[in-house]
């Protein structure tokens, strides 16, 4: 959520900055709500002060044995007026809160201008795109029955997959390799978190209320909308919410967490997109990196976290590029995002495998996650970051397609061989 004090002072500037991401901030509505809020707050405070003054006067007159009837008459319907003002003030507060919950983060000044992914800017390209003396297959044709979309469709429907044999084993090996690298080489603490979260958690990281349609809500849940529970869309949600409503000791920061979880997404906005294979699924797995850092240090942390995700690609010797997302392609909560895109021979192009984002204090304000001031001042909002380190299924696709030999075999990357003892190749039959 945006800083309300900053917004009150600089609403036109915020509106203009949000246009860089294609969002039209309704300045008139905001200023109308803010004006009503301020007027009702002042009215409530004035009525409260008047009631306090009258009550004290009545108390003194009563203590002196004076007739208090005239003073009571003067008070009249003051209590009812105060209650009405308070109720109207609360209603405006709630309307303003709902309005602001739907406003995305302001893009950082370094974010490239642009409308969509075609306007993203390549920062660096790493590794060498493989040159084959044969027509490379995509992971579906290459792995055959080991990537079984038909069986998954029978069990669950479209956008699911059943992996088997050596492919399932490699999927597991990739997960363990990523976790070991991030905990042993990069200093992250591994956490195991729930796969079901409440609405407050999704609001904290920005998936609710705007992206309700993308979530898998649990049916049959009783209670209010706030009490509904959801399958997690990413480990970002439960892991970042570990610090919700906390005041953190500055000496404990940065907090660096890594978690392996399944992720569940309805993909409501991607109808007809990436329907072949297992690239875009309703259920998939990621190894997620989350950092909670002091304010003022998050840009350095973004570079570090992005480097940690890149290290997985480097160790697997997969060609990739780092791309700065333009304003129109930014996620709702992000101030800046660097995507890592891996080369997929089966598609003949780079595709996203990780999004590394700095949210500044946007999520922390929604979660009330603060850092205690070392000098005894008021706590400040923490800064939060996350990124996939990496999406396991997409990494599996990249390994299968980049390490194929044209004869139905896939070489196991050197970095994975300790996790697949005795296995140097996956064999699928070939042609």
Image (spheres, rainbow, N blue to C red):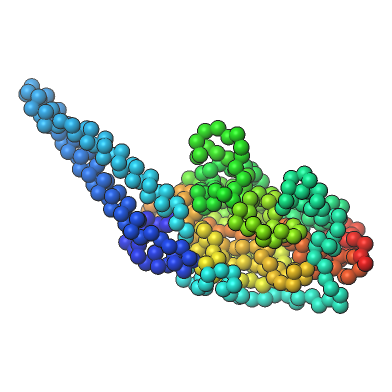
Tell me residue 274's x, y (percent): 70, 61
Q: Is residue 138 left or right of residue 232?
A: right
Q: Looking at the image, which is closer to me, 342 or 58? A: 342
Q: Judge whether residue 409 can be spotted in this image.
A: yes
Q: Is residue 275 above or below residue 126?
A: above
* Residue at the front extreme, as displayed: 272
Q: Looking at the image, which is closer to me, 271 or 185? A: 271
Tell me residue 305's x, y (percent): 61, 63
Give me the residue at 34% from left, 42% from top: 91
Give me the residue at 63% from left, 58% from top: 270
Q: Is residue 242 left or right of residue 404?
A: left
Q: Is residue 16 above or below residue 368?
A: below
Tell me residue 2's x, y (percent): 42, 57
Q: Is residue 322 above or below residue 95?
A: below
Give me the residue at 52% from left, 61% from top: 334
Figure label count: 0
Q: Is residue 291 left or right of residue 379?
A: right
Tell me residue 37's x, y (percent): 30, 49
């Amino acid at each position: 959520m945006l800083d309300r004090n900053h917004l009150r002072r600089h609403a036109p500037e915020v509106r203009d900055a949000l246009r860089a991401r294609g969002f039209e901030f309704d300045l008139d509505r905001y200023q109308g709500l803010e004006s009503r809020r301020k007027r009702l707050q002042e009215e409530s405070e004035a009525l409260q002060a008047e009631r306090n003054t009258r009550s004290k006067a009545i108390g003194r007159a009563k203590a002196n044995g004076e007739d208090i009837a005239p003073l009571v008459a003067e008070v009249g319907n003051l209590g009812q007026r105060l209650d009405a003002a308070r109720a109207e003030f609360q209603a405006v507060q709630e309307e303003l809160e709902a309005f602001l919950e739907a406003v995305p983060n302001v893009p950082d000044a370094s974010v490239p201008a642009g409308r969509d992914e075609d306007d993203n800017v390549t920062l660096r390209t790493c590794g060498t795109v493989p040159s084959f003396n044969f027509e490379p297959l995509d992971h579906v044709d290459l792995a055959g029955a080991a990537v079984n979309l038909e069986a998954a469709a029978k069990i669950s429907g479209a956008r699911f997959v059943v992996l088997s044999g050596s492919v399932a084993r490699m999927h597991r090996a990739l997960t363990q390799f990523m976790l070991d690298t991030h905990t042993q080489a990069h200093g992250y603490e591994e956490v195991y978190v729930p796969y079901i979260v409440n609405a407050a958690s999704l609001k904290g990281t920005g998936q609710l209320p705007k992206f309700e349609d993308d979530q898998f809500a649990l049916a049959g849940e009783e209670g209010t909308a706030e009490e509904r529970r959801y399958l997690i869309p990413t480990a970002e949600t439960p892991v970042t919410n570990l610090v919700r409503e906390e005041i953190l000791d500055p000496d404990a920061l940065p907090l660096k967490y890594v978690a392996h979880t399944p992720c569940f997404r309805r993909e409501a906005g991607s109808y007809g997109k990436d329907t072949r294979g297992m690239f875009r699924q309703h259920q998939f797995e990621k190894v997620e990196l989350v950092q909670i850092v002091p304010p003022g240090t998050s840009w350095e942390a973004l570079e570090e976290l992005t480097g940690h995700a890149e290290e997985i690609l480097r160790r697997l010797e997969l060609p990739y590029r780092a791309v700065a997302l333009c304003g129109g392609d930014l996620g709702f909560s992000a101030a800046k995002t660097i995507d890592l895109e891996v080369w997929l021979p089966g598609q003949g192009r780079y595709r996203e495998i990780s999004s590394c984002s700095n949210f500044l204090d946007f999520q922390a304000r929604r979660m009330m996650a603060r850092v205690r001031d070392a000098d005894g001042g008021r706590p400040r909002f923490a800064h939060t970051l996350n990124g996939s380190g990496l999406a396991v299924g997409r990494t599996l696709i990249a390994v299968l397609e980049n390490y194929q030999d044209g004869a139905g075999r896939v070489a196991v990357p050197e970095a994975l061989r300790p996790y697949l003892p005795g296995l140097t190749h996956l064999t699928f039959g070939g042609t």
